[in-house]
Image (cartoon, rainbow, N blue to C red):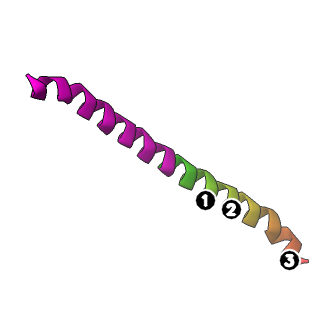
């Protein structure tokens, strides 16, 4: 009986962990994109 009650909570914890990982991946991708754009913007300034 106790096991049945705990299962939805375990699923909820797993979902929370999964969404946290997705958030971390999106944050990393956003940072990489930002620095890539910044580097491309800085390139013409370095040429002249």
Mark in front: 3 vs 2 = 2
From the image, tell me which residue sits under label 2. Answer: 35
Q: Residue at x 27, y 29 (%)?
A: 9
Q: Indicate the quadrant containing the N terminus: top left, top right, bottom left or bottom right.
A: top left
Instruction: Classify residue 19 as left or right of residue 38.
Output: left
Residue 35 quadrant: bottom right
From the image, tell me which residue sits under label 3. Answer: 47
Mark 1 neighbour class, 10 Å CA radius: few under 14, some 14 to 19, many 20 or more? few
Q: Residue at x 80, y 62 (%)?
A: 41
Q: CA distance from mark 3 to mark 1?
A: 23 Å
Q: Position of residue 30 (x, y in %)?
A: 61, 51
> Does dot 1 land on a helix, a strand or a loop?
helix
Q: CA distance from mark 1 to mark 2?
A: 5 Å
Q: Do the residues bearing badges 1 and 2 touch, measured as CB atoms within 8 Å?
A: yes
Q: CA distance from mark 3 to mark 2?
A: 18 Å
The residue nearer to you, when weighing 13 against 38, is 13
Q: Residue furthest front?
A: 2
> Is 34 in the magenta?
no
From the image, tell me which residue sits under label 1. Answer: 32
Q: Do the residues bearing badges 3 and 2 touch, measured as CB atoms within 8 Å?
A: no
Q: Do the residues bearing badges 3 and 1 touch, measured as CB atoms within 8 Å?
A: no
Residue 13 quadrant: top left
> Does dot 3 land on a helix, a strand or a loop?
helix
Q: Position of residue 45 (x, y in %)?
A: 88, 71
The residue nearer to you, when weighing 19 against 12, is 12
Residue 7 quadrant: top left
The residue nearer to you, when weighing 22 against 43, is 22
């Amino acid at each position: 009986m106790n096991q049945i009650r705990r299962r939805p909570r375990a699923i909820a914890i797993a979902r929370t962990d999964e969404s946290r990982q997705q958030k971390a991946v999106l944050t990393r991708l956003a940072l990489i994109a930002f620095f890539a754009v910044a580097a491309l913007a800085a390139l013409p300034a370095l040429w002249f």
